[in-house]
Image (cartoon, grey):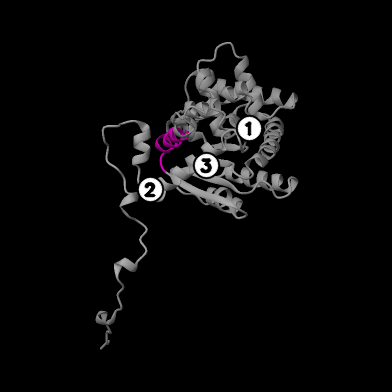
Amino acid sequence: MTEYREADLSRLKTVPIAQRSNKVDATLLAHPPGSDRSFAAFWTSLPDILAARDLRFVVDRVAAAAGKHGVVVMLGGHVIKVGLGPLLLTLLRRRVLTHVAMNGSAAIHDFELAAYGGTSEDVAAGLDDGTFGMAEETGRDMNAAITAGAKAEQGAGEALAESLRRRQALPGRDVSVLVGCAEMGIPVTVHAAIGAEITHQHPAADGAALGATSHRDFRRLAASLPALDGGGVVLNLGSAVVMPEVFLKALSIARNLNGGKPSHFTAVDCDMQRHYRPRVNVVERPTRAGGRGIMLTGHHELLFPLLCWGVLERLGAR
């Protein structure tokens, strides 16, 4: 028969609560709505705990960096197709962002919104009969822009933006991040993953042109990163693989060419769930030499508006 032993709780040593260090007290708690229903009142009502504290820190860092240090934003496609382009454009107009780097999906959604007024097809339905990703105009026009850009020694982002600006009809001009960057003189780069984007399915796709323009954009991103040094911010919005991998290599180039700089910047990953590559390649490894890495987790269409509105609130009339 098994003999069970039990811990004697009567012998435990307790401590007075007054001697305990608490992480939470009444000064950190959320405030219910009062008569002031402005965004500023909402923002200050958030609890000063965990993710809300991290969000405030990121907002403060971005606002402090505006006009002084680099603020690089890296985009996955979902960020554009859930409607956040106009917020990015607002930050561009306020000269908060210094470089926009897109994966191929983000560029496609932005190009389609600009050129044709709509984007985001039903993947499951189209996959059943092989029509997924086969939009004629998207593949034709984007590949033509990339091919022409390669001949003109442009980057992919530059080529796509200039192609859009030359179009006579551009129903989504006012919501296009590509167009906005070009018009405001902010570098925009597009980082292709061959075979991962619907435009690569099109007969007009030219692998050499895709490679040349995307590699030029890789070098351009690396050249933008030194501006992060000593107070900049890099925001990874919704790219789980491509942009974290590209960023890590571009950062290594920048540090190799600039005596270990940039360092001591804030690195932030914003996504609906936490992935390995953004955590390690954006948040953790790049900030080992100084700075801070933060992961903010939530739906893009809720989290990024909070971040954007918070930055604009902090900037005020600046």
Q: Tell me residue 256's x, y (percent).
A: 73, 48
As displayed, is residue 112 above or below residue 219?
Answer: above
Q: Is any atom of residue 317 visible in this view?
A: yes
As displayed, is residue 231 above or below residue 289?
Answer: above
Q: Position of 35 compared to 304: left or right?
A: left
Q: Amino acid at mark 1?
A: Thr
For label 3, the residue is 61
Q: Is any atom of residue 134 visible in this view?
A: no
Q: Quadrant of residue 187?
A: top right
Secondary structure beneath dot 1 equals strand
Q: Position of 171 compared to 229: left or right?
A: left
Predominant SS of the magenta segment: helix
| Front one among 105 and 229 | 229
The alpha-carbon separation of the residues under discs 2 and 3 comes to: 16 Å
| Front one among 242 and 54 | 54
Q: Please report the bounds of the magenta region as a residue range.
A: 298-311
Q: Residue 90: which numbered mark, if any?
A: none
Q: Earlier in the sequence, mark 1 or mark 3?
A: 3
Determine the residue positioned at 70% across, 44% down. 254
